[in-house]
Image (spheres, helix red, strand yellow):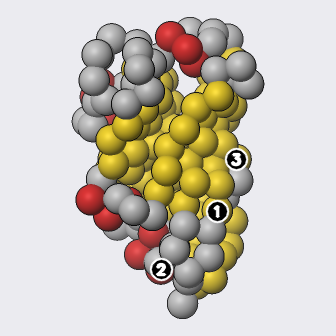
Amino acid sequence: QVQLVESGGGLVQAGGSLRLSCAASGRTIAHYNMGWFRRAPGREREFVAGITLRDGSTSYADFGKGRFTISRDNAKNTAYLQMNSLKPEDTATYYCAADWRKTVVPVDLESYDYWGQGTQVTVSS
């Protein structure tokens, strides 16, 4: 079993950047596909980005393409989400998640077995 803890959220102006971290413990993230999701007020949790354990292939939601970059450092047992050119509509709680069964990046919540508690990102206009 793996435990996930997100950090790096905060308040930023539109156009700014944040880097979220997802620190894992219990098991190495090298065994997992890693994903980032977000939940905005009044909305359902949605896929943001994911990276596979097998070859580091990545996948992004359309709203994140060109602005967000997911990465992983297996030696540090940490996954990251670099977010640039932030917009007010990116305001949400961001969650990292881990999946050990799929061979491609899962984009659905149900595929992920482990979740962090979330970190709040607020983008002011």
User: Which mark sits nearer the N-terminus, 3 or 2?
Assistant: 3
Which badge, 1 or 3, is on the more N-terminal residue? 3
Residue 68, given in percent of the width and then of the height, sits at: 47, 57
Task: Indicate the amino acid at tag 3.
Answer: Ser
**In which image quadrant can residue 1 be found?**
top right
Q: Residue at x 45, y 64 (%)?
A: 67
Marking on residue 18: 1
Label 3: state its secondary structure.
strand
Amino acid on which disc 1 is placed: Leu
Label 3 – label 2 distance at C-alpha: 19 Å
Query: Which of label 1 and label 3 is nearer to you?
Result: 1
Give how far across and how far down residue 20 sits, in percent. Answer: 63, 50
Considering only vertical position in the picture, is 30 above or below 76? above
Q: Which residue is depicted at the point 47% across and 80% down?
A: 88
Q: Can you say whether 18 is above or below 86 in the image?
A: above
Q: Which residue is mark 2?
A: 88
